[in-house]
Image (cartoon, helix red, strand yellow):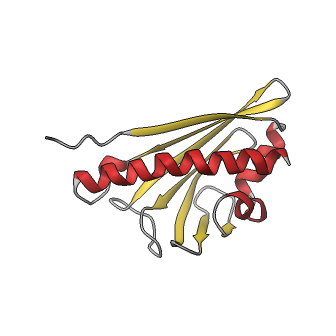
Amino acid sequence: MDTVVPTRITREIHVDAPVERVWAVLTTAEHISGWFGDSASVDLRPGGAMALGWAAYGDFRAVITKVEAPRAFAFRWAAEPDVEPGQGNSTLVDFTLTADGGGTRLTVAETGFGLLSRPAAAQAEHAQENTKGWEQELAELKAYAEA
């Protein structure tokens, strides 16, 4: 049986906080480390470096690809710790923020799993892990932004 590798995973949540607050939570190192991993560094500009750290998993490097405050933010991050993101070893994460009543509709889409330089089963496993990860991380973002 052939392994099916998703081309895109998408998650959407409503955050009971204004767009500007959610933008800050998504793009500021001090806030990112409050909901996404244990540490973060961000050079908030296209081409800027970003690092996301987890004590249990290591530091994952990223390059920011889009900054359209306060509506769109994207980065390409390495699939393995301690390597620079590049062709064959990274996926693209794209956030969109939309005003929704008094809050924010936040959508995250991650693409590029099928382009990772690994066997299809490993690509599919990475997509599955990140699907679960985004569910958990977005719940943490929501709680953090609404606090």
Q: Is residue 96 left or right of residue 90?
A: right
Q: Is residue 133 left or right of residue 122?
A: right
Left/right placement of residue 22 relative to residue 91 reads right
Q: Residue 55 at what x, y percent from top left?
A: 59, 75
Numbered disc total: 0
Horizontal arrangement in the rendering, residue 41 relative to residue 55 (left or right):
right
User: In the orientation shown, which residue stands out farthest toward the left?
Assistant: 1
Residue 117 occupies quadrant: bottom left
User: What x and y, as percent, mark residue 30?
Assistant: 78, 65
Q: Which quadrant is the N terminus positioned in? A: top left
- Where residue 4 appears, x then y in whole percent? 26, 40
Give the image quarter of residue 29.
bottom right
| Residue 66 shows in the view | no
Q: Is residue 3 above or below residue 58?
A: above
Q: Residue at x 59, y 68 (%)?
A: 51
Q: Residue at x 26, y 60 (%)?
A: 118
Residue that appears at 76% across and 52% down: 25
Q: Is residue 16 above or below residue 89?
A: above
Residues 49 and 7: in front is 7
Residue most toward the top? Answer: 101
Instruction: Decide if residue 92 is in sight here.
Output: yes
**Residue at point 62% right, 51% down?**
137
Q: Position of residue 99 (x, y in %)?
A: 77, 29
89 or 67: which is nearer to us? 89
